[in-house]
Amino acid sequence: MCNQSVGLIQRAVEATGISTTSITLDESITKRVKPPRALSVPYRFGYPLGEPNNPELQHAIIAEALSLLENEETPPILKVAGTLRVP
Amino acid sequence: MVSIFKLDDLYRFFMRAYPVKSYGGAPPNAALHKELNRCRVALITTAGLHRPEQTPYNDKIIGGDCSYREIPNTIETQLLALGHRSKAFDASGTESDINLVFPLDRFRELENEGKIGSLNDRHFSFMGSITKPKWLIEKTAPEVGQLLQADDVDVVFLTPV
């Protein structure tokens, strides 16, 4: 349900005029809730940033999620993360 | 013992059948017209984080606890407590590195490198496992949006658990 809550909170924050981007662990939920921008990552629940104590991987995920803010498509924008497999 | 991977699959199976409301039309769109290195950024997570001195979330509320906790930007991240426990996920990763769900240390690095303008003075955490989100939609989420707007935040980064 976390992924639903994130989408709902995100919509409410964006409605105040703030640009938002998020990570989702459950694309099917995010497609229904339709937050403005979300990056779908291939990890299990509890691991949205991939791996503990792996700053390099965490930075790569954050960078990809932040890049959605520069995407000029009309929201909802839902992208599948590129090269972010846990080694 | 059922492995966490099996539980993850079970949860996903359950969620596919769960009647998540469709939230209708197009989402709001506040396109960013500023370079990230000039933006003020805040984080929001639904990991149910709270400071040790704050009231924990209430897992007895039917439909879920829609309240939120303010997390000061100056917090030592190791001090944050994970209020969200669920059979659907394995909390051991977060116990060893809170950045897995709330990447404040990573954003501090981005701030130091000048990749983002600055971090806001406060961030927010909500609880997960909200099955009846009416209060979240109508009250607590818009409230946090207004607080962040009053802080002149440009960008919010959100993470589930």
Image (cartoon, grey):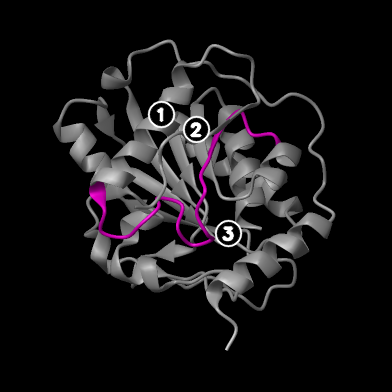
Disc 3/disc 1 C-alpha distance (Å)? 27 Å
Q: Is residue B12 above or below residue B160?
A: below
Q: Amino acid at mark 2?
A: Thr
Which chain does the numbered disc 3 sit on? B
Verify CB contact (< 8 Å) between mark 3 and mark 1. Answer: no
* Numbered disc in front, either 3 or 1: 1
Q: Amino acid at mark 3?
A: Ser
Disc 2/disc 3 C-alpha distance (Å)? 21 Å
Q: Is residue B104 magenta?
A: no
- Judge the density around disc 2: few (<14), some (14-19), many (≥20) Cα neighbours within 10 Å: many
Q: Which residue is mark 3?
A: B67
Q: Position of residue B82 (x, y in %)?
A: 42, 69
- Dividing the picture into quadrants, the one containing residue B153 is top left
Q: Is residue A35 above or below residue B141?
A: above
Main secondary structure found in the magenta portion: loop
Q: Is residue A47 magenta?
A: yes
Q: Which residue is mark 2?
A: A21
Q: Which residue is mark 1?
A: A66
- The span shown in magenta is A34-55
Q: Is residue B30 above or below residue B67?
A: above
Q: Residue furthest front?
A: A87
Which chain does the numbered disc 2 sit on? A
Q: Amino acid at mark 1?
A: Leu
> For the point 80% across and 51% down, which residue is it?
B20
Q: Position of residue B73 (x, y in %)?
A: 27, 47
- Judge the density around disc 3: few (<14), some (14-19), many (≥20) Cα neighbours within 10 Å: some
> For the point 33% across and 72% down, which residue is it?
B52
